[in-house]
Amino acid sequence: MDVSKHPLREFLEIPYEQLEELNLKSKDYQEQWISMEQAEAERRAYLEGEKRIKAVTVAFTDLEGRLHMLDYDKKYLLKADALTFDGSSIRGFTRIAESDLRLGIDWRAFYWMPADVFGPGKVLVFGQVLGKDGEPYEADFRGRLMRYTEELHKQQGIVANVSAEIEGFLFAHRDAERGYYDRGKFELISTGGYYHSLPQDSLRQFIDTAAEVQRAMGFENEKDHPEVGPSQFEMNYKYAPALIAADRIQLYKLLCRQVAQSMGMTASFLPKPITGINGSGMHTNISVAKNGENLFWDGKGKDNMSDLGNQFIRRILHSAEDLCLILNASVNAYRRLDPHFEAPNEITSSATDRSSMIRIPLASRGGQRIEVRSVGPDANPYLSIYSLLRTGFEGPEPDANAPAPKRVRRRILPGNIYEAMGSHRRSTWIREMLGDESATKYCELKEMAAHRCPREMGNLIKRSEIMFHHEVTNQMLWNTF
């Protein structure tokens, strides 16, 4: 018997148009920084009154960027004094001897999910990881990004807006990344290429379906299309304040994976899954506004960039090597930084050169921004955006009084994860920004994965860099090492 279709059960299922309205209203709560107390009171009242909701999915993200979800029975959640979970089971969180962590709820970040994709009778809310004492947990970078951007807004009236262009690949078979252990390859479902896909082929059907889900979840879609690589896709949506943008990255990857799985395929966000074709990036666009004015715009400046924008760029470029492990979080990510495939690996900025780490797109006053092109799609979005914002606003700058070098050296991003780990460890700015414990934990996790892969990358993608990738590995695979 299919209990999900039992006639005695009536769970919440909302039409897509109504879902979009609800989720856009929820976005307004976040944009306006509605007090948590007000948001909690309204959400609790809604959950009490809506009898068709059976459970609340509370989502949080670990240090490496994996999205974790816990389903709480609605009645239990509404009565619970505190929500706890085993932090020692989450890589990068607590040790076994000090395992318990608490889970708070960001009641502003409340989403209604399409029932045909995620199941009926549930809503999703983002959580805040707390220590035993109820204080914010250092390794929870969603919480740190939330507090940092709220402080910018309340103290300076500044809103940091972010949009991400997230590329991915669509492969045949469910769980294709886990199946890589047996198959030793990925199977493409389309060989069309950039902008080219027949209206009803598998790739186009996937993109169309995923775009509908995005729209229903209030992403404010802009455009979607196949990318340069065969079976590669990209779906663009409107910029948003930094915390909302980071949440959307996690939801985007979740919905893409879920839609692909429902179609018997896999949406993969490995940076470079196949030898010889373009990899996937997550170009991260950043602008800063105050009272509705774009602070990166100066019509008289070079490339229309303001002094603040240029300072923001200088600081990120100055710390580029130190940030690289955060923005390129896996062994496989360094294959994407190959100059033969339009790699954004030069530590410079440009309005035209797409091999530059930072591009200044042609834009009007409202759209003036910087585009950090070196970010991989498997990076922790909260950690990456937090690090870029803090570095842009507060990071060290080149010494203006230092003598100019006799020969200008072309700076290139690290070519493998070991070089990136070295820069990460040596950086006083990274330790100041992340905290000693989080900086050390993060680097240790990267080292664990690196040691399971060949030190010399070579030209061919190795099975281990797929199998021990932080987004797809599981305990059984890690124990085979």
Image (spheres, helix red, strand yellow):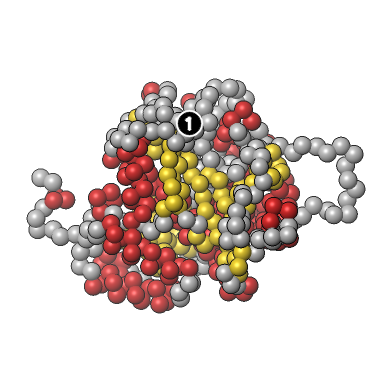
**Count of labels shown?**
1
Q: Nearer the viewer, residue 454 or 169?
A: 169
Residue drawn at x 42%, y 24% is 185
Above-or-below relation of 182 to 112: above
Residue drawn at x 33%, y 60% is 20
Disc 1 packing (10 Å; few <14; some 14–19; many ≥20) = many
| Quarter of the figure with the N terminus | top left
- Kindly identify the amino acid type of the residue bearing the numbered disc 1: Gly
Residue 469 seen in render: no
Left-right relation of 286 to 62: right
Above-or-below relation of 304 to 46: above
Q: Nearer the viewer, residue 87 or 391?
A: 391
Above-or-below relation of 189 to 205: above
Above-or-below relation of 269 to 295: above
Residue drawn at x 33%, y 56% is 216
Q: Which residue is mark 1?
A: 229
For residue 357, which quarter of the picture? top right
Left-right relation of 399 to 457: right
**Residue 3 location (% of width, % of height):** 14, 50
**Residue 354 location (% of width, % of height):** 63, 39
